[in-house]
Image (spheres, rainbow, N blue to C red):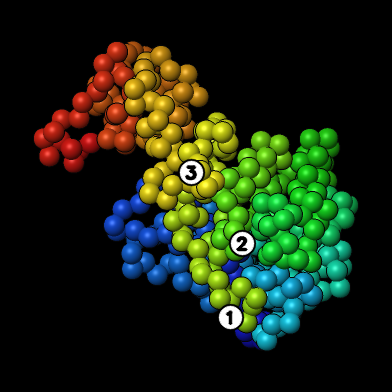
Amino acid sequence: METIIKLEEIATHMHLEPAEEVSPRPLLDEATHVAPCGQVLPKGDTSSKKPSLGIHQAVVGNKTVPMIKTMLTTACERNCFYCPFRAGRNYRRTTLKPEEMAQTVNDMYRAGMVNGLFLSSGIIGGGVKTQNKLLDTADILRKKHQYRGFLHLKIMPGAEKEQVRRAMELADRLSINLEAPNDKRLAALAPRKEFVAELLRPLQWVEEIRQTERPFATWNGRWPSSVTQFVVGGTDETDLEILTTAHYLYSQLKLGRTYFSAFSPIRDTPLENRHAEDPQREHRLYQASFLFRDYGFDLEEMPFTQRGHLPLDEDPKLAWAREHLADRPIELNRAERRELLRVPGIGPQGAAAILAARRRGVLRELTDLQAIGVRNIRRLSPFVLLGGKRPLINPNPNQLRLL
């Protein structure tokens, strides 16, 4: 029971740490709002509330599984200005030993309560010592308890390369939070962290190991994916700064995802009087980052304002299409996959369906697209041609509902 109380206390702030949350939907309407980590929820939905033990529904591969997000300790010697666990804050600290954490998670796993673990920690005694405790916990889970669930393991600032390699052998996913897009902005958020040496370099090591070594010693025969997180609006950083770093992470370090967390002030921290960031900004950054990862867009194609921000009132893909495709629509019967992915309303699955359908015949009507599973007709129709003609949506209200 004492351990459960500890987990409940830790869970109080774990909603600030993204981990495999459901991806945001591309469009907003009056019936939705943006929850933490970019997830879009119906208004009145209570699923964004913090669960008592830090258990939430997480997307792992093609499945949704219950995952517990927790920490070995909420004590920390670092003084990050935005963090509820920062050193010197008047806050009750909670600590679990590696054996205690591993046993508790395994019990929950065997009982069917969870099928995934996100494990982080405050830093006590330096990053190397703290990382060893995280590795000990993961090792006990995998070897002693034969845990076969999903494991997302944090890499601590200052961890050594061999520790990163060992974490890669035990985990399904690794993350280290950059928090800011560069060293200048990090100094305003976390003055005792070093952007390149402590945070970026471990992510570089992960990709270097994936590219040069075989995963013989890993628990499942595969190297883990890697992710990071940015605090959005904690300083005066621009979207251009954030997305410049995100683009590098996707293109060069092959990150699985960059998370964005809209800044929200926390009492008794140096930034407690700073205004909370608009969650819509967080949402637009997610959309832009997915354009890098899944759609082949480049940084130069983002519709930045003169001040280096994305427009809040428009999806960046739609903004790009209005500028580039409105007068030069794409012929869906001839376009390559890369061109198809630039059309609003067409994602990777839709592009694959169109390419497959073209091998069987010519697409002539919007109903042909509906028949192969491309549903967002109203969104794509201004930017495409079908058989050399611009498609028209039937103005009949009944037909529009079908479309």
* Image quadrant occupied by the N terminus: bottom right
Mark 2: secondary structure: loop
Residue marked by disc 2: 235
Amino acid type of disc 1?
Arg
Q: Nearer the viewer, residue 150 or 344?
A: 344
Front-lying residue, 88 or 145:
88
Question: Label 1 vs label 3: CA separation?
Answer: 33 Å
Q: CA distance from mark 3 to mark 2?
A: 18 Å
Which one is in front in this view, the residue at disc 1 or the one at disc 3?
3
Secondary structure category for the residue under label 3: loop
Residue 75 percent across, percent down from the top left: 74, 78
Using the image, tell me which numbered label, if any, was put on residue 305: 3
Compared across the picture, whether 61 is left or right of 330 comes to: right
* Residue found at x 29% / y 58%: 31
Nearer the observer: mark 1 or 2; the answer is: 2
Residue located beneath label 1 in the image: 267
Q: Is residue 162 visible?
A: yes
Sequence-wise first label, 3 or 2? 2
Q: Categorize mark 2 by other alpha carbons within 10 Å: few (<14), some (14-19), many (20+).
A: some
Indicate the quadrant containing the C terminus: top left, top right, bottom left or bottom right: top left
Helix, strand or loop status at disc 1: loop
Q: Earlier in the sequence, mark 1 or mark 2?
A: 2
In x, y percent, where is residue 114?
Answer: 58, 65
Give the class, few, some or many, for how many residues have Cα within 10 Å of label 1's Cα (few <14, many ≥20): some
Residue 53 in view of the camera: no
The picture places residue 177, in percent across and down from the top left corner, at 69, 57
At label 2, the amino acid type is Thr
Query: Which residue lies at the image location 40% right of the left edge and 70% below the top edge?
Result: 46
Q: Which mark is residue 115?
A: none
